[in-house]
Image: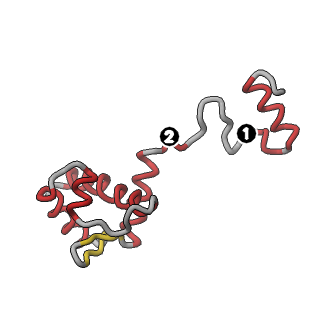
């Protein structure tokens, strides 16, 4: 297992487990369920799951895999990085540091400037 492939697989598997848990799908999928979700063969995935258990990122039990605290932190970070361009402000939407957050009147002015007018 080379280091680059390890990082690539870590950044595929751990965020997927983080997302599955956060969405309430499962907190501990089987390797078959995870392979299906990631669209790779179970035979290709299983050695990586074993490696991630050995590194302390996953716990294995009864054929299922669960993120450890360290694995959850890595999965959360990779998930946030992967989707950062989708979770920020949308086009025309102000961000957290916008001056409009200082008062309701400022918020109305900000909205008027962005939209063009308010009814």
The crowd level at tag 2 (other Cα within 10 Å; few <14, some 14-19, many 20+) is: few
| Residue occupying the far left of the picture | 43
3 is higher (above) or lower (below) than 73: above
Q: Nearer the viewer, residue 107 or 57?
A: 107
Q: In which quadrant of the rendered image does the N terminus lie?
A: bottom left
Q: Single out the residue that lies furthest toward the right.
A: 105
| Coordinates of residue 83 in the picture (x, y in percent) | 45, 45
Q: Looking at the image, how many numbered discs can be counted on the residues?
A: 2
Extreme residue toward the top, this view: 116
Position of residue 85 measured from the top left corner of the image (x, y, whole percent): 49, 39
In screen coordinates, is 113 left or right of 68? Answer: right
Residue 22 x, y percent position in the rendering:
45, 61
Q: Mark 2 touching mark 1, by CB under 8 A? A: no
| Residue position marked by numbered label 2 in the rendering | 86
When the figure is inspected, residue 65 is found, relative to residue 97, above or below; the finding is below
Residue at image location 37% in from the left, 65% down from the top: 26
- Give the residue at mark 1: 98
Res 27 seen here: yes
Residue located 26% across and 51% down the image: 38
Of badges 2 and 1, the one in the foreground is 2
**Residue at image coords 73%, 26%:** 114
Indicate which disc residue 35 carries: none
Image quadrant of residue 17?
A: bottom left
Q: Element at badge 1? A: loop
């Amino acid at each position: 297992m080379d280091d680059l492939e390890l990082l690539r697989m870590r950044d595929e598997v751990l965020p997927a487990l983080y997302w599955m848990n956060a969405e309430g799908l499962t907190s501990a999928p089987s390797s078959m369920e995870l392979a299906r979700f990631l669209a790779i063969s179970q035979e290709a995935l299983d050695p990586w799951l074993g490696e991630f258990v050995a590194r302390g990122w996953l716990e294995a039990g009864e054929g299922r895999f669960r993120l450890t605290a360290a694995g959850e932190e890595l999965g959360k970070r990779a998930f946030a990085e992967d989707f950062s361009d989708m979770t920020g402000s949308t086009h025309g939407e102000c961000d957290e540091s916008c001056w409009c957050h200082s008062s309701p009147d400022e918020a109305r002015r900000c909205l008027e400037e962005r939209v063009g007018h308010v009814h």
